[in-house]
Image (cartoon, rainbow, N blue to C red):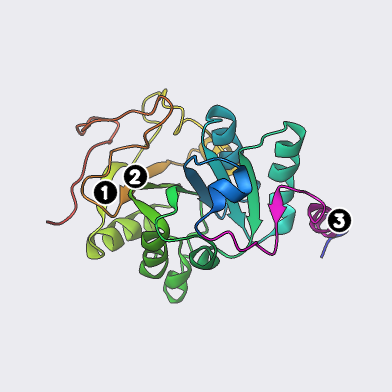
Amino acid sequence: MPRKKLKRIAEISSFDNVFEDAPDWKGNWSQTCFGNNRPITLELACGKGEYTLGLAQRFPDRNFIGVDRKGDRIWKGARIALEQNLKNVIFLRTDVEQIIDLFGEKEISEIWITFPDPYPRHVKASKRLTSPRLLNIYRNVLEPNGAIHLKTDDEDLFDYTLRVLETEGCIVNRVTHDLYKQPISDELLSLKTTYEKRHLEAGKTIRYLCFGFERHQPDMPKYGNASSGNSVVDDVGIGLVRGPE
């Protein structure tokens, strides 16, 4: 392993906003970790934590947790959070599958999945972050009105996810096959990770989904300047798509 990675992995052990052996706060993360009763947003496979940080900076009245198993990736986001004295964000160094053991039932308000590994080989489909196996985990930890967001440049992963959501009886609230076909002003969606910027520079199309498990959930999270209401399909490709009755 390169020396730089080893140094970063060793350094995060001293960060007070990174947990490698997650404490037993199941069901009480907001109160015990953040000292409040505010809703929690998870970013899964957060990488450098760019989306986690961006959301935490914009919405100080919510709690944010970035989850990734690679310490050298988490290091950058955690370091920036410490430098900016962001008290509403922490990072967990663990596998995504472990969130069912770390968080209580319905404890999470929102989940973001931004540019995950698409695992294009069929034999690895179960590793996709929108696979039925992982959706069942999200269903357990996500509150009834909770939203899950997916941003990806991978068309196959996007189409696979839509098929899985239909099979699993999920409610797809918002879908677009070309997020930046027209300019957007939404604070939640306009955040861009390093990967997203590279994809856009390469001329790739960014796709977006917002979905959940309960019919009465809102189109978008209930905070910030996020759009809400029943949007109609337009030439940006965003619209409200109902799940199976």
Q: Which residues are magenta?
A: 5-26
The answer to whether one can see residue 49 in this image is no
**Mark 1–mark 2 CB contact (< 8 Å):** yes
| Quadrant of residue 225 within the rendered picture | top left
Find the distance from the CA under tag 1 to the CA under tag 2: 6 Å
> Which residue is at the front of the view, 141 or 241?
141
Residue 35 is marked as none
Q: Secondary structure at mark 1?
A: strand
Q: Which residue is mark 3?
A: 7
Q: Mark 2 is on which residue type?
A: Cys
**Mark 3–mark 1 CB contact (< 8 Å):** no
Q: Which residue is mark 2?
A: 210
Q: Quick one: label 3 or label 2, which is nearer the N terminus? A: 3
Count neighbours of disc 2 (C-alpha within 10 A) and say few if under 14, some if 14 to 19, many if 20 or more: many
Q: Which residue is mark 1?
A: 172
Count neighbours of disc 3 (C-alpha within 10 A) and say few if under 14, some if 14 to 19, many if 20 or more: few
x then y, percent, for residue 121: 46, 70
Find the distance from the CA under tag 3 to the CA under tag 1: 42 Å
Q: Secondary structure at mark 3?
A: helix
Q: Quadrant where the N terminus lies?
A: bottom right
Q: Mark 3 is on which residue type?
A: Lys
Q: Quick one: label 3 or label 1, which is nearer the N terminus? A: 3
Find the distance from the CA under tag 3 to the CA under tag 2: 37 Å
Q: Secondary structure at mark 2?
A: strand
In the image, residue 171 lies in the stretch drawn in magenta: no
| Quadrant of residue 176 within the rendered picture | top left
Judged left or right of residue 236, residue 67 is right
